[in-house]
Image (cartoon, rainbow, N blue to C red):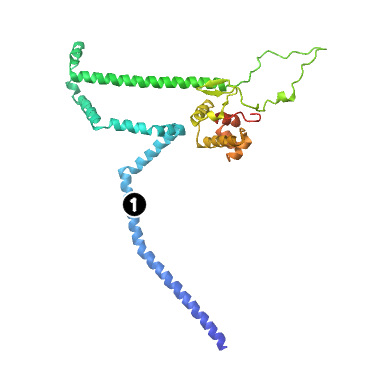
Amino acid sequence: MNKEFTTITERLDTVLEQLAYLTERQRKQEELIAELTPIAKLALGTATEKLDQLDQQGYFAFGKELVEVAKKVIEGFSPQDVHELGDAVVQILQAVRAMTQPAVLAVAADASSVMDDAAAVKPLGMFGMVRATRDDDVQKGMAIMIEVLRRIGHGANAVAEKSKQLEDKKAKLQLALGSRKQKKPLGIERKRLTAGTPAAPRPAPAAQASCAVPAGPQPSAAVIDGIAYTADGHLVDATAWTRRLGETLAQMQGVTLTDAHWAVLEAARADYETTAVSPNIRRLTQIANVTTKDLYALFPKAPGRTIAKIAGLPKPAGCL
């Protein structure tokens, strides 16, 4: 009996010790919360006051307008436009640096100050303009303006010539990549066979395999900018392909290339280098880790054929 009483007493002592520990821990937590509450209130009040100051100064309104500007840029420009802008950033910065040189800014400020005295400037007639040309500064200014106009005209002609060359290239590529199918003219019917007239022989099965890819290199049907194309619009030599050419071919197919497009194109070219065969749609889903639905979303019109054309590969096997 005494032994059992001793055991119960020891267990009660253990429980009391644990209760004392929990009580002490609860007390410390309450003290910590009591100490942190004024600090948290002060920090929250300071943050609220600072945010209110920023709001009154217009920072939030400015940020909102920046978001709207970014939204308009995203809606108005394609990733390709942003990529081209990135390529031109260096030239833009060089132009800005040239225009912000102290000497240039001084000339611009001096010229703009004329507008402040515009009311005092008297009109000049024809003879007055002729007399004004005797001034060295006027002659220098006229020479500079004429040189500026000459360079602007030279640049405009270069842009027009480049645009014309691009249009000519598009027309040639469109002609080379156009459909080879000939539609049957309306009103022409098949001749009826009369009794005793032998039927025309049916072509051999090998001749009907219109989906098969002919063996060996295909004959060249057109050569544009030194690049040979087959009659069905594919590159004769896949090694002549470049990314810039791929961008041009994509434009001809009505496709705007993104990183997702390039991932599929690069996978197709890598597979061709390994197998020497252009991948079909099923193969593309395996090597590019995409679904058939994804391929049709990226290349809506005949994905297998379109990918082969843009990637500079031969026509894939299979009906496309």
Give residue 69's position: percent from left, percent from top: 39, 36
Residue on which disc 1 sits: 48
Q: Residue at x 52, y 83 (%)?
A: 9
Q: Residue at x 30, y 33 (%)?
A: 97
Q: Secondary structure at mark 1?
A: helix
| Residue 38 relative to residue 287: left or right | left
Q: Which amino acid type is marked by label 1?
A: Thr
Image-quadrant location for residue 7: bottom right
Q: Residue at x 22, y 25 (%)?
A: 111
| Residue 81 relative to residue 200: left or right | left
Residue reaching furthest to the bottom:
2
Q: Residue at x 34, y 19 (%)?
A: 153
Give residue 173's position: percent from left, percent from top: 53, 22
Mark 1 Cα shell of 10 Å, populated few (<14), some (14-19), many (≥20): few
Give residue 114's position: percent from left, percent from top: 20, 24
Q: Quadrant of the N terminus?
A: bottom right
Give residue 162's position: percent from left, percent from top: 43, 22
Image-quadrant location for residue 61: top left
Q: Quadrant of the C terminus?
A: top right
Residue reaching furthest to the right:
196
Look at the image and tell me whether residue 303 can be seen: yes
Quick one: 61 or 163, which is closer to the camera? Answer: 163
Image-quadrant location for residue 282: top right
Task: Give the tally of numbered discs.
Answer: 1
Quick one: 276 or 31, which is closer to the camera? Answer: 276
Quick one: 45 or 181, which is closer to the camera? Answer: 181
Quick one: 182 or 169, which is closer to the camera? Answer: 169
Look at the image and tell me whether residue 78 can be seen: no
